[in-house]
Image (cartoon, rainbow, N blue to C red):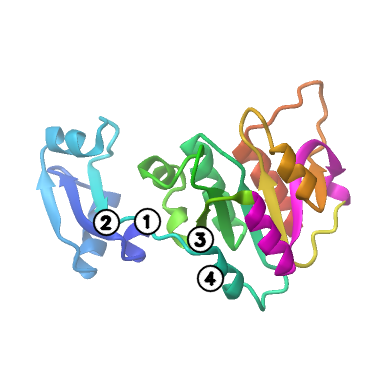
């Protein structure tokens, strides 16, 4: 539905016994003049590459990223601009979940590297419940260089780390960019060094690990609070 709203869909295949929300998708496709084809289950499985296709498959155009310079220009006059930087997040499910939370909390954009990291694919789109289409996503060749450009544009850089300042004590006013680290290694040392402040989510047990997407959502909530 989100892909249709954002004019990303080229063609839709639906099962023969479509009902409920699938009928709504067909209606949206018709209004948007998107071709819809009725297919058998085998065809849907072939297209989706899985049996878990929910009786509908959409062929979408390549995802359109925003250039960093264009993003900075777009947010130039927004005093409380919010960006989340994903430092080598590898699991597309995490990427998608973070994008969904970004949409929910009104985060302006996501920045991620083009190497050794998950990119926007079908898993990310599905995990985000389509929210990835409603947020600016920027793919960059070098996170550290991008951080420097953000600093020059007035952004304060916060890196998440176990040794950081309690997020409940942080002042997130002004333009803020938050770095969420790799699922296993956390935020890269060079990025920690170049950040303005390291922040941490207080824990209340001896278990000090949170899923990356859960941690990102908690930080987003605290920023808004």
Q: Secondary structure at mark 2?
A: helix
- Per the image, the residue denoted by label 4 is 70
Q: Secondary structure at mark 1?
A: loop
Q: Position of residue 105 (x, y in %)?
A: 62, 57
Mark nearest the camera among 1 and 2 is: 1
Q: Earlier in the sequence, mark 2 or mark 4?
A: 2
Dot 2, crowdedness within 10 Å: few (<14), some or many (≥20)? many
In depth, the one of 3 and 152 nearer the eye is: 152
Q: Residue at x 51, y 57 (%)?
A: 138
Query: Mark number for residue 63?
Result: 1
- Per the image, the residue denoted by label 2 is 25
- Alpha carbons under labels 2 and 3: distance apart: 21 Å
Magenta residues? 144-169
- Alpha carbons under labels 4 and 3: distance apart: 14 Å
Q: Residue at x 25, y 38 (%)?
A: 48
**Mark 3 and mark 4 in contact (Cβ < 8 Å)?**
no
Mark nearest the camera among 1 and 3 is: 1
- Alpha carbons under labels 1 and 3: distance apart: 12 Å
Q: Position of residue 62 (x, y in %)?
A: 32, 55
- Per the image, the residue denoted by label 3 is 135
Q: Quadrant of the C terminus?
A: bottom right
Q: Residue at x 40, y 47 (%)?
A: 125
Q: Residue furthest top?
A: 206
In depth, the one of 102 and 157 nearer the eye is: 157
């Amino acid at each position: 539905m989100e892909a249709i709203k954002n004019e990303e869909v080229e063609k839709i295949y639906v099962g023969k016994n479509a009902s409920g929300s699938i009928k709504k998708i067909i209606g949206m496709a018709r209004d948007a003049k998107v071709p819809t084809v009725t297919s058998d289950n085998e065809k849907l499985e072939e297209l989706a590459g899985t049996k878990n296709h929910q009786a509908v498959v959409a062929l979408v155009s390549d995802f359109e990223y925003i250039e960093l310079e264009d993003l900075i220009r777009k947010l130039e006059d927004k005093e409380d601009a919010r960006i989340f930087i994903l430092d080598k997040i590898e699991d597309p499910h995490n990427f998608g979940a973070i994008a969904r939370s970004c949409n929910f909390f009104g985060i302006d954009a996501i920045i991620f590297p083009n190497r050794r990291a998950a990119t926007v694919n079908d898993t990310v789109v599905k995990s985000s419940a389509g929210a990835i289409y409603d947020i600016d996503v920027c793919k960059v060749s070098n996170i550290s260089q991008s951080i420097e450009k953000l600093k020059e544009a007035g952004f304060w850089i916060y890196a998440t780390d176990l040794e950081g300042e309690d997020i409940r004590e942080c002042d997130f006013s002004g333009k803020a960019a938050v770095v969420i680290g790799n699922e296993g290694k956390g935020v890269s040392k060079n990025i920690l060094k170049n950040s303005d402040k390291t922040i941490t989510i207080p824990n209340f047990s001896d278990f000090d690990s949170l899923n990356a997407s859960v941690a990102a959502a908690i930080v987003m909530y605290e920023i808004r609070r």
